[in-house]
Amino acid sequence: MSIKAAPSILSGDFSKMGEEAARMQSAGADMIHCDVMDGVFVPNLTFGPKMVADIKKCVSIPMDVHLMITEPERYIGHFIKSGANYLSFHVEATTKAKEILLAIRYAGVKTGIAICPETPLGSIYDLLGDCDFVVVMGVHPGFSGQKYIPDTTERIKTLKREIIARGLNVEIEMDGGANESNIDEIIAAGSDINVSGSCAFNSPNPEKIIKKFQGLC
Ligand code: DX5
Ligand code: ZN
């Protein structure tokens, strides 16, 4: 399976989201990562399903929607309708994780659980059988451009071992703090999808960053 690069539109210019997504697609991105924040689960606000649907009209690659909202069960249907191809929510944000995973999968959308840096990995082990991917946070969710939390690499390795030991087909998505200096270590640890916010959008050469995040250079 090839390693995917997922630029996060959170670091794009919000006055021209469609163009920003198209720019990343032209640079070789595999999917567009959309960070949805509610100002409650995280101390920041971004956008809702209409933005996802409108960005989707400007690209042909999959939309990877990362919900950082409380009680995501309230909005899952809206984001499925908006055209999300990958849809993840936080294990810390709901008591209904299993039902949500099943509902997303039933809709034919890739279903993912996201986990914050301080949450024990064991809290998602019972859910792995119902996931297509796990979003391992490399920063405290809320903002792009934060520093990578070094323990994340070990968490990716541990999770990868668990997935392999159980013979599961679950991808690991690393989100937050990845850059040109640590991406090789993140890929070597077992990350299959690499999110890049500030690194891809602020670079004069996003093609190069995306290749690096795909493990190709
Ligand atoms: C953080 C978001 C990330 C963020 C990544 O809450 O979930 O997707 O945009 O940005 P960088 O790569 O700059 O850390
Ligand atoms: Zn994200």
Image (cartoon, rainbow, N blue to C red):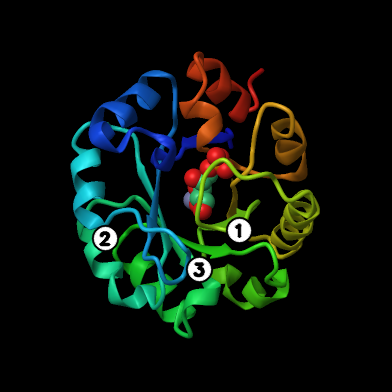
Query: Residue at left 63%, top 53%?
Result: 139
Q: Which tag is nearer the camera, tag 2 or tag 3?
A: 3
Circle 1 crowding by C-alpha within 10 Å: few under 14, some 14–19, many from 20? some
Chain-order first, disc 2 or disc 3? 2
Mark 3 lies on residue:
90
**Residue 166 picture quarter:** bottom right
What percent of the width, then of the height, locates residue 149?
73, 51
Query: Residue at left 23%, top 56%?
Result: 49
What percent of the width, then of the height, locates residue 201?
46, 28
Q: Amino acid at mark 3?
A: His
Mark 1 lies on residue:
140
Chain-order first, disc 1 or disc 2? 2
Furthest residue in direction bottom, as rendered: 95
Q: Which tag is nearer the camera, tag 1 or tag 3?
A: 1
Circle 3 crowding by C-alpha within 10 Å: few under 14, some 14–19, many from 20? many
**Residue 29 picture quarter:** top left
Which secondary structure, mark 2?
helix
Residue at mark 1 to residue at mark 3: CA–CA distance: 12 Å
Q: Amino acid at mark 2?
A: Ile
Q: Is residue 103 left or right of residue 8?
A: left
In this view, the residue in front, 129 or 51, is: 51
The image quadrant where one finds the N terminus is top right
Please tell me whether residue 12 is drawn above or below residue 115 in the rendered image.
above
Q: Amino acid at mark 1?
A: His
Which secondary structure, mark 3?
strand
The image quadrant where one finds the C terminus is top right
